[in-house]
Image: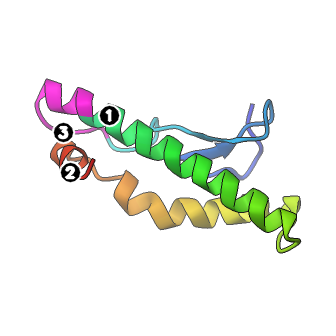
Amino acid sequence: PYQNGESEMFRISTQHGMTDFSADDLPQLTGSPKQVSWAADLRNVRGRYLANSFDQMFRNARDRGEVTDEQRQALLAAWSAKHLTEMSNASARYWIDHR
């Protein structure tokens, strides 16, 4: 249940209106099985943090009259592009070292 034109990592849920994060379209992590498991958890935490940060930033800007609800998807696409390089890092060691 997502709106059209969504980014791959971040999507606006039509059920609750909040931004969701999904690692489904990100590269598979590499490393030992234990590293990959730990790094997947770390990457998911970072993704959820970024989604929550976007929602807070958007709400604040909307409340100040700087953006409209209609501009949200374009802003989300820009937000996703900004964080794509970091979130696409497939090295489990990267995520563990940068936790």
Of the two numbered discs 2 and 3 on the same chain, state the one appearing first in sequence. 3
Which of labels 1 and 3 is toward the front? 1
Q: Point out which mark residue 77 bears.
A: none
Of the two numbered discs 1 and 2 on the same chain, state the one appearing first in sequence. 1
* Residue at image mark 1: 40
- Name the side, left or right, on which 18 lies relative to 89: right
Residue most extreme to the bottom: 66
Q: Is residue 56 above or below residue 93?
A: below
* Residue at image mark 3: 30
Residue at (76, 62) in percent of width and height = 60
* Residue at image mark 2: 94
The image quadrant that residue 92 belongs to is top left
Q: Is residue 38 above or below residue 12?
A: above
Q: Secondary structure at mark 1?
A: helix
Q: Is residue 20 above or below residue 34?
A: below
Based on the picture, tell me whether residue 37 belongs to the magenta stretch: yes
Looking at the picture, which amino acid does disc 1 mark?
Ala
Tell me where the magenta segment starts and ends, as one range.
28-38
What is the crowding at mark 2: few (fewer than 14 residues within 10 Å), some, or many (at least 20)?
Answer: some
